[in-house]
Image (tube, rainbow, N blue to C red):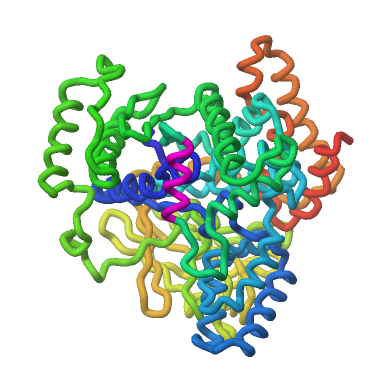
Amino acid sequence: MENKLILVEGIPGAGKTTTARKIKDKLTSEGKKVILYEEGVLHPADMAWNAYLNEEEYVDFLSKCFEMWETSEKTISKEELKYRVEVQAQKEDKHVILAYTRIGFPENCYWSLIDEVASKEICDGRRSLKEFKEIHLKRWERFAKKALLDDTIYIFECAFLQNHIFELLGVYEKSDEEILVYLNDLISTVQCLNPCIVYIDPNNVEKVVLKAAKERKASDNSRKDWIDEVANWVSNINYGKNHNLSGKEGVFSFYKERLRIDKVMIEKLDIPVTIVNRNWYFERRYRMNKKLFLRLGVLLLSLSLVACGPKDNFSKTNSNKSNNKTQSSIKKEENNIKQGTAPDVKEENKVNKDTNSPELFIVAGGSNKVPGVCEYYLSELEVTPRIKPSINTKNSSYYDEKNQDNIYVDVVFDVYNLSNEAKMADDIITTKIKIKNNEYSCFSLVESTDGSDLEKDASINPLEERNIHYVAEVPIVDSTTGELEVILTINGKNFSNKFQLDSIQSSVKENTEQNTQSDVKQGLTEEEYYIIIKEAKQRQQDYIDSIDDTHIKQSVQSSLSAAIAESSALYIKYPDDTDTIDAALKRVLDGE
């Protein structure tokens, strides 16, 4: 399996952003679907630089933005201000994730609001370590489940080592062993994506930090320079206070300790790693996918020449692991770069593009927004002979396929109506399915507000969120293998994404047998959820206790992580019972 998740890591200033963008450009030029999440953006898994607001706090923040607009110079309209906030917000369960540093406020007067909403982050000790871990494990696992649905490759910048080690080392001063256990739990949630790390190893911490400080000086006097902000942060975290760190020297010392821990984690984590030295030699480490490594190797060599001027001699360390084809490919790439013809730095206007082609909608990277129309995200994609609501009761309605030669493709979106009027499902999103060059129109079924029934002609009120099933009837013979494309039309614009039927095809026989059974899924009591979650925790603990090797023990999923994973599975089965499941999970995690 190809690496579907690439984690780009290194200390601040090492070149993570540049490297991540180059990897994205290279893979995109090869026809891959790639989504890059840089530091601080609205993120599907990580929480750094993202506020964690309940719905009431988000509404209050919007109100304060509008109040600030009334006293501002009004360089933008109130509608534009609202849009800039909403495009950086994502509804998730009963909370709103807000990438507050990316809002793009037009005037400095809004900075007071930024400082206020920053206090709603879960990082820097604002939440307990237990909450910090639980929220991240849940988000990473949810991301992985959705990322499996299509063939997109995801690139995360500093979302794995940097942001979590900063918290565990800087705030909680955890030991190497404790950090390793935490990171193993986190990476276990996305192992199904075959993740790998590209790590940029600086030759000299001081030089890297000073170079970053020079590049990141504040453009005006309204904010401190980056290096001063970092020095202030380091001196005020627990690690900085207990080690008397201050000023630039304190930053150097903290980053050197961070670098040491990074290297320990890289050595012990069970994940493929490619290390790139700051002087731009690279070597293969562990079990990196050969094809991906070749692409990254050539790419990172090109990065050394394009971004950093003349390179040092290419290291031949472990050259016995490289074949002639690899070396000739590197040489060819190097020649292309020297001649100004590197394929991964082509100008966009030289790439043949169909300007009328649909825009890619996001599957695992959070929600999609069409301003003034809707916000939506893919909830489920299934091939099935029966369409059923999320919560099945004795009174639930179903739609069964009557033609034995056909089957349903059920595309379920969680849709949030952003317009000022009630709309029918097909007026918000029109959907069709394309399989083997044949297109099939979809009809829509709207789940009731409690998720226990299906309504065919239901309207969605303004600012209301509903699950909508867009259903196509297709021949069974066409539904088993190959590619399936989902095409959406929203406000006259087309969006699409492609999926492999092999990975989403449910067994028709299994579904048919399940659908003929009279019993249905109903919600359980808190005590029943508690027993299920506690048993999952105990099973994992029993397994851990049976392991003699200490290193293996550290690498397996913890019992608490197993409990959280079990609760996540219950969320999917019983989405209307999340509060009850959370109460049961809390009892288990509290050791009851």
Q: Please state the horizontal and vertical placement of residue 41, each as a whole percent of the image.
A: 51, 58
**Magenta segment, which residues?**
205-215
Which residue is found at the position 49% from the left and 45% from the top? 12
Residue 46 is left or right of residue 61, and the answer is: left
Residue 386, position as x, y percentages in the image:
54, 55
Q: Is residue 476 visible to the viewer in this orientation of the structure?
A: no
Eyeballing the image, is 571 above or below 84?
above
Camera-side residue: 285 or 427? 285
Taking 443 as reference, is 543 above or below it? above
- Residue 152 belongs to the span the image colors magenta: no
Q: Give the residue drawn at x 39%, y 30%.
A: 274
Q: In which quadrant of the rendered image does the C terminus lie?
A: top right
Q: Quadrant of residue 283?
A: top left
Q: Nearer the viewer, residue 131 or 540?
A: 131
Residue 420 lies left or right of residue 482; in this view the side is right
- Residue 580 rendering spot, x and y as whole percentages: 81, 52
Residue 364, position in %: x, y? 49, 53
Q: How many marks?
A: 0
Q: Is residue 228 visible?
A: yes
Given residues 584 and 221, the one toward you in this image is: 221
